Every structure is written in C-alpha cells, then in structure tokens.
Amino acid sequence: MQANTQTTPIRTGDRDRIRKLTVTAMLSAVAFVLMFLDFPIPMIMPSFVQMDFSDLPELLGAFALGPVYGVLISLLKNLIHLLLASSTNGVGELCNFLFGAVFAFVAGFVYQRRKTRAGAVLGAVLGSLAMAVISVPLNYFLTYPAYVVLYGMPMETILGMYQAILPSADSLIKCLVIFNMPWTLAKGLLDAALCMLIYKPLSPILHGRR
C-alpha cells in the first residue's frame, strides 16, 4: 500500500497573506531596534526629547502593504518595547504608537489611492502634518501629565528646560506648539525623505519579488 505523498499547494491568496505577515514582522523588528538609536539635538529641543527613525519601517510597510499594515508595525514595535524595555509604564509606548499609527495610516491611505511617486510624497507629507498636529493634544493631555506623575518632575521643571532655549515659552501649550509640533513634522519629513531613497532598492523584498 503506497502512502499519499502529495501536498496541497498554497493558494495565491494565502501565500500573499503569509508574505505580508512576514514582511510586517521583519519591519516591526527593525523598528524596535531603531527605537534604541535615538539622540538629542541640543539647542533645538530639550534633552529629554530624542530624535529617532523608528517610524521609517512603518512608512515602508504602509506603502508596500497598505495603511493597516503600517499601523500594525507601529503596534508590534511598541508592544515589543513595552515587554522588553519600557521605562514609562506603557505611556511612552502608547503615545509612540498613536503618533506612528496616524503617520503611517494617512500616508498609506493617500498612496493606496494614488500609486505614483507624487502620491507617495503627498501621502508622506500629509502623514507628517497629521502626526505633528495630533502631537499637541496627545502631549498636552496624556504624555506630559503622565510623566509628571511617573517621574515626580514638576511641570515648572519641564517648562524651564524649554525656557533655557526660548525664555518666552512660559506655558506647556506654547512649548508644544513652538517646539514639539515643528519637531514632529521635521521628524516625519526626514522619515519620508529616507523612505523615498531606500524604497526602490528594498522593493523586491517588500513585495516578495526575486
């Protein structure tokens, strides 16, 4: 009696889902590593606000796989960080996720409807703008009040770090509008510029082409 050694072929739709999940996992891991490669820019922002490029993989995923996958990469990146390296009881990861999710979703949504280089640029710029705008209420109502509680740092001390750069920044809302919103916009635009440079060379990996 001969055993049946035939295997059921993987359908095209299943293969595509497996590829997308594999790329999502890969980009999430890269984004997690990039979170640790942060650095301050003195005289422009207080030292506790760091620059990093961990939103870049989310943008790559949003363009290559769709906006939902960009959001998923941001979620996975922050879940890994929460489990392995969090020092903010989840507050930093929550805010980072919300920033990245808005950035990736808006950019991916626009590009999904206009799949040209111009559409990618437009999507990335609009995503950067959306992230910059939403940074103000998120930081005002969530991030900074939570850090005051978690670290016992008076709000006056935080404002003093901004005032060391600009003495007229005498309220939190001023600090967020004058400093954090342009900073977040610039961060998104830098990620967008890097994405435009490396997307084409990475395209065969992102789209599963040989």
Image: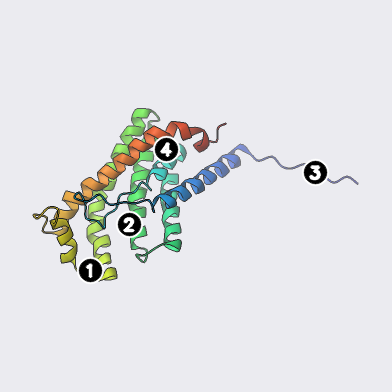
Residue where numbered disc 2 is placed: 95
Q: Earlier in the sequence, mark 3 or mark 1?
A: 3
Task: Tell me, yes or no, whether the two marked residues, 2 and 1, touch with CB atoms within 8 Å.
Answer: no
Asked which secondary structure carries label 1, the reply is loop
Q: Earlier in the sequence, mark 4 or mark 1?
A: 4
**Label 4 with label 1: CB-CB less than 8 Å:** no
Disc number lying in front (2 or 1): 1
The earlier-in-sequence mark between 4 and 2 is 4
Task: Reply above or below: 32 against 124.
Answer: below
User: For the residues marked 2 and 1, what is the alpha-carbon distance in whole angstroms?
Assistant: 19 Å
Which numbered marker is on residue 153?
1
Picture residue at 16% right of the left edge, 61% below the top? 159
**Image mark count:** 4
Amino acid residing under circle 4? Phe
Query: Pointer 1: residues within 10 angstroms few (<14), some, or many (20+)?
Result: few
Q: Label 1 is placed on what type of residue?
A: Met
